[in-house]
Image (cartoon, rainbow, N blue to C red):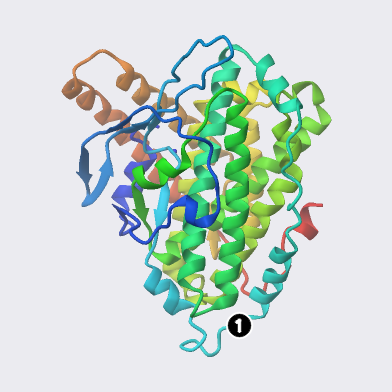
Amino acid sequence: MPAMAAHSLADLSLAVRLGTSDSSLSSCRTLGGYGFRPLPLMVNRERRACSYSHGGVKVAAASEVAVKEKPKNNNKKGAKEGIKESLLTPRFYTTDFDEMETLFNTEINKNLDQSEFQALLAEFKTDYNQTHFVRNPEFKEAADKMQGPLRKIFVEFLERSCTAEFSGFLLYKELGRRLKKTNPVVAEIFSLMSRDEARHAGFLNKGLSDFNLALDLGFLTKARKYTFFKPKFIFYATYLSEKIGYWRYITIYRHLRENPEYQVYPIFKYFENWCQDENRHGDFFSALMKAQPQFLNDWKAKLWSRFFCLSVYVTMYLNDCQRTAFYEGIGLNTKEFDMHVIIETNRTTARIFPAVLDVENPEFKKKLDRMVDINRQIIAIGESQAPGFVKNLQRIPFIAALVSELIAAYLMPPVDSGSLDYADFEPQVVY
């Protein structure tokens, strides 16, 4: 599952309140209970900052989980700067499990069509990638060769990706457990998706070990706050997250296949099969929404669909434009890459969402670029030496300008789309 810096995009999310709040996932299991074995404890400190309230929604102002560097053979020790959590950072999610049970309870919903779920379950059980994530000596050799800014930004890529995948593991595992009695088929699919996410997170965390680092995933389970989304918002957001993850991975894989001189680390060679896990997960969320047509067939669904498209696309664009060194390091133009991913994701999403953004309108990209410039100014203010209250005053006009751009992008004429009759998914389209 994909991942957001600065107090930017969140202002739209908070202004158009989702009914979200930060809460702990009281029923969440520890990693040990799932048989997922994280690397040894490497965390050396945790810093929790106070939170502030914005529009009735409580948001963590800052928190930090540090990742400590493993001692090398020469016995020199170093500490890596902590992972700073911000409003653009990958988040952990929870939902209303009781409502989810009601939505998919086969006793309550006698007309619930299970045929597509059963077909998807058979595909998940096949486990095409069971033996795919096998490492070789190339990994450590490539990590040792990587130096300078690329090494630093690549480690951040692994950290953020691992956190996002692990977030999906926790949510899917709990949904699998809670739905076991009311809908065993849907529950088993969630459990098998958690298997995939755990496999991805473990593979990424093992990649961090090539750089003498490791995330303590068990610690993250207990230390991170969980953001509450109602089930229908989980459907919209997670569908988009999985599909945009698919297009990111397959695009990078195809680019490096054609330009092997930029293959700086062998993890990219795994992306072709890996992205099919993301694709299947997205297909499942598409099936969940089709089984609950009230989430797709009214005017409110159109508004929420556009909102989540905008949130996900802007998040990715702002995030990636802060990390151009990573994309340049693998031979990609960051903005061109992002626009390709956004356009392809939007075309895919149009098959199920009742309305999507007109991202192929040149004005949409112009708005994204203006948001990037504004966001950079907000970040620069945050990194200045001015007193906190001065920074807050300096941010106000830029935050207002950013919100204005977001609203203008949201209000652009949308593209009506979607079909509840759609049953054939991307594997037939993209290959």
Position of residue 191 measured from the top left corner of the image (x, y, whole percent): 57, 63
Please give the name of the residue rendered at 36% of the width and 46% of the height, measured from the top-left corner. Answer: 222
The one nearer the camera, 360 or 34, is 34
Judged left or right of residue 351, residue 430 is right
Position of residue 155 measured from the top left corner of the image (x, y, whole percent): 55, 26
Judged left or right of residue 403, residue 131 is right
The image quarter in which residue 399 lies = top left
Please give the name of the residue rendered at 56% of the width and 64% of the height, measured from the top-left corner. Answer: 190
The one nearer the camera, 217 or 11, is 217
Residue 187 position (above or below residue 62):
below
Please give the name of the residue rendered at 67% of the width and 59% of the height, measured from the top-left corner. Answer: 280
The one nearer the camera, 393 or 180, is 180
- The amino acid marked with disc number 1 is Asp
Please give the name of the residue rendered at 44% of the width and 75% of the height, measured from the top-left corner. Answer: 101
Judged left or right of residue 224, residue 36 is right
User: Would residue 176 be visible to someone looking at this image?
Assistant: yes
Position of residue 137 measured from the top left corner of the image (x, y, whole percent): 75, 27
Position of residue 376 measured from the top left corner of the image (x, y, whole percent): 41, 24
Residue 377 position (above or below residue 214):
above
User: Would residue 414 be visible to someone looking at this image?
Assistant: no
What residue is shown with label 1?
113
The image quarter in which residue 47 lies = top left
